[in-house]
Structure formats: structure tokens, C-alpha cells
Amino acid sequence: MNRRSFFKLTAAMGSIPVLNKLAYSAPAKVNPVDLKKDTPIAVVYHCDFPQEARFSAMLTNIGNHLSVYDNDPFKIKIVVVAHGPGVKFFMKDLSGSPWENEPINIPELARREKDLTLYGVEYYICNITLTRLRLNPDKLYDFTKIVPSGVGAIGELQSKGFAYIKVQ
């Protein structure tokens, strides 16, 4: 099975309600050392900021970035690494978090994030942030993955040829 077929199958499975209910456990843990640059162009977007408008702009930029490469996951690989306050944008539920009283449009952002996974975008969440803030990893979206350190993952990806982008 090629990457494109895999992403389409994964998206289709995610739309099956029964399978969605089974996917409410903590995301998989990934060692950044195991990550590979398997496309001609690879980019890591750094998300460590708290502003929803800035995060929304980053998602728009990612969509625009993909469009330059015909939304083809064989031409470009984009990953987002989140740590610190950037983690809140990948949580299904903010209760018990430092951001529980913030008016964030969680459903809309989650829809946009998940839509980007159809084109191979991956989201890596910092385990140090989860541990230090005592955040429940079960509250992360099932399309995310946990890395030991967000900044460590960014450095590892850059050493493998991923370009670095941070939306200002």
C-alpha cells in the first residue's frame, strides 16, 4: 500500500463512529530518532505559542504550503511539533489544564487539523509539557503522537533535513 492510499484509508476509518470510540486512548509515543525524511521537501512547523489566531494562521499556512505541492504527500512532508502552551490546540478537553477557562474554538480547530492529516500532516506533542503541566494524554486527539521532548524533536528533524518554520 502506498502513502496516499494509506492516508485515504486512515481518514475513512476515522469517519466510522465505532472505530472513533475505540481510539480514545493516549496517542502513540514516537522516538524522533526513528523519524525519516522520506519526501523531497520536508518541513517542521514549531508551535509553542498560546494565541488562537496565530495557530489558525499556521493551519492556513500549512494548507497553502501543501497546495504548492498539489497536496501530494509524496512531494512534501509536514510535521507540527507542539510544546508549552501550543499543546492546548491538540486537546479534546481543556478541563484541568491551565487553559480550561480560555474560549478556544476546539471543534473548528480540530476539524482543520484532522483535515490536514489527509495530506500526511503529522502532529507531535511534547511529553515534557504533558508531564510538567500534569496533562492527561488521553485528552489529546487520536491523530497526534507523543515525543519525549518537543524541542528535541525539532532539532532531530532539522538534523535530518527538515526545514524549520515558525509562524509569527
Image (spheres, grey):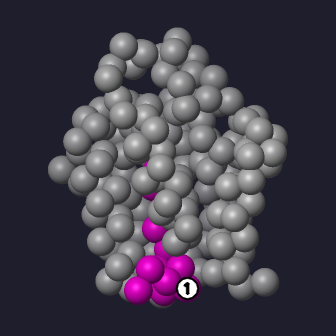
Residue 158 shows in this picture: no
Give above or below for 4 relative to 129.
below
Give above or below for 107 relative to 45.
above
Identify the residue shown where x is 40% and y is 43%: 108
Specify whether 36 is left or right of 150. Answer: right
Identify the residue shown where x is 69% and y is 64%: 12
State the count of labels.
1
Query: How far from the left and from the top, in percent, is residue 13?
Result: 74, 60
The secondary element bearing badge 1 is classed as loop
Specify whether 31 is left or right of 156. Answer: right
Quarter placement of the N terminus = bottom right
Query: How far from the left and from the top, in percent, is residue 36?
Result: 61, 72
Label 1 neighbour load within 10 Å: few <14, some 14-19, many 20+: some
Query: How far from the left and from the top, in percent, is residue 139?
Result: 61, 29
In the displayed orientation, state which residue is furthest to the front.
Answer: 17
Q: Which amino acid type is marked by label 1?
A: Phe
Query: How far from the left and from the top, in percent, is residue 90?
Result: 50, 39
Residue 65 shows in this picture: yes
In the displayed orientation, state which residue is furthest to the left.
Answer: 168
Q: Is residue 112 magenta?
A: no
Residue holding disc 1: 74
Residue stretch rendered in magenta on the structure: 70-83
Identify the residue shown where x is 55% and y is 32%: 92
Specify whether 24 is left or right of 168. Answer: right
